[in-house]
Image (spheres, rainbow, N blue to C red):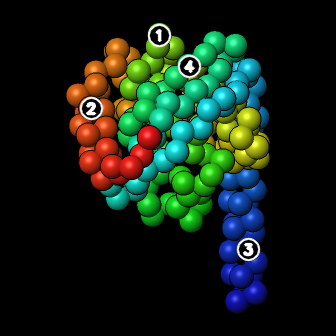
Amino acid sequence: MKQKIFNYKVRNALLVTFGFVAVIYFGLSITLRDIKTHDVEILEKSPLFPYDNYDYMITEEAIYTVDKKRMEIPAYFRTDFASIPQALWFIEAPYKSSFVYPAIWHDYMYLCSNNLSRKDIDDIFFSLLRYEQNSLFTSLKMYLAVRLFGSSYFNNNTCSDTVIQEEMEHKYKKENKHHG
């Protein structure tokens, strides 16, 4: 009798695992076909300054090209890289070096969309992750996370963070008198 119960539990566990893997596999393959690839390059990577807790600011302009169009992230932009809850950092830490500059671009574009749709921004983020040599699996995980959970952070309006940015510049220059 105990052997039957054990076999039943093992069989159910295998079925659930297989089902989970099948859903993930087919979900990712459908998603992968839906992602528009972009020609991206990171031309200038700004130095980073720890701002508060797990937030950082870039201290110089960060420069990217997307489909041969130059895009600049202004100095003193504040970011948390990827808004991954700290409890999930064992899966993927947001400060992994290959995430940093794609995440900075993505965070900025979610605030200042430059007439790009949220889907376009997320697709470009995926291309930037691949440009930074992240694996396909990791890039897809990050892409799916922003597609599933990023909508509340997306601002379809124009930029309005100049006052905050000026405060951050003042704080940085006060704490780093000998910079530039």
Residue 91 percent across, percent down from the top left = 59, 60
Q: Are marks 1 and 4 in contact (CB under 8 Å)?
A: no
Count residues near mark 1 (Cα–Cα under 10 Å), then give few for <14, some for 14-19, many for 20+: few
Q: Are marks 4 and 2 in contact (CB under 8 Å)?
A: no
Tag 1 residue: 115
Tag 2 residue: 166
Residue 10 marker: 3
Q: For the residue marked with disc 2, what is the amino acid?
A: Glu
Tag 4 residue: 71
Residue at mark 1 to residue at mark 3: CA–CA distance: 52 Å
Front residue (pair 65, 6): 65
Is 59 left or right of 5, judged from the image as shown?
A: left
Residue at mark 1 to residue at mark 4: CA–CA distance: 13 Å
The disc, 2 or 1, on the residue closer to the chain's N-terminal end is 1
Residue at mark 2 to residue at mark 1: CA–CA distance: 24 Å
Secondary structure beneath dot 3 equals: helix
Residue 84 percent across, percent down from the top left = 47, 51
Front residue (pair 138, 13): 138
For image coordinates 40% across by 54% down, the residue present is 50
Residue at mark 2 to residue at mark 3: CA–CA distance: 60 Å
Q: For the residue marked with disc 4, what is the amino acid?
A: Met
Q: For the residue marked with disc 3, what is the amino acid?
A: Val
Residue 69 marker: none
The disc, 1 or 3, on the residue closer to the chain's N-terminal end is 3
Quarter the C terminus occupies: top left
The disc, 1 or 4, on the residue closer to the chain's N-terminal end is 4
Question: Residue pushed farthest bottom?
Answer: 2
Count residues near mark 4 (Cα–Cα under 10 Å), then give few for <14, some for 14-19, many for 20+: some
Q: For the residue marked with disc 1, what is the amino acid?
A: Asn
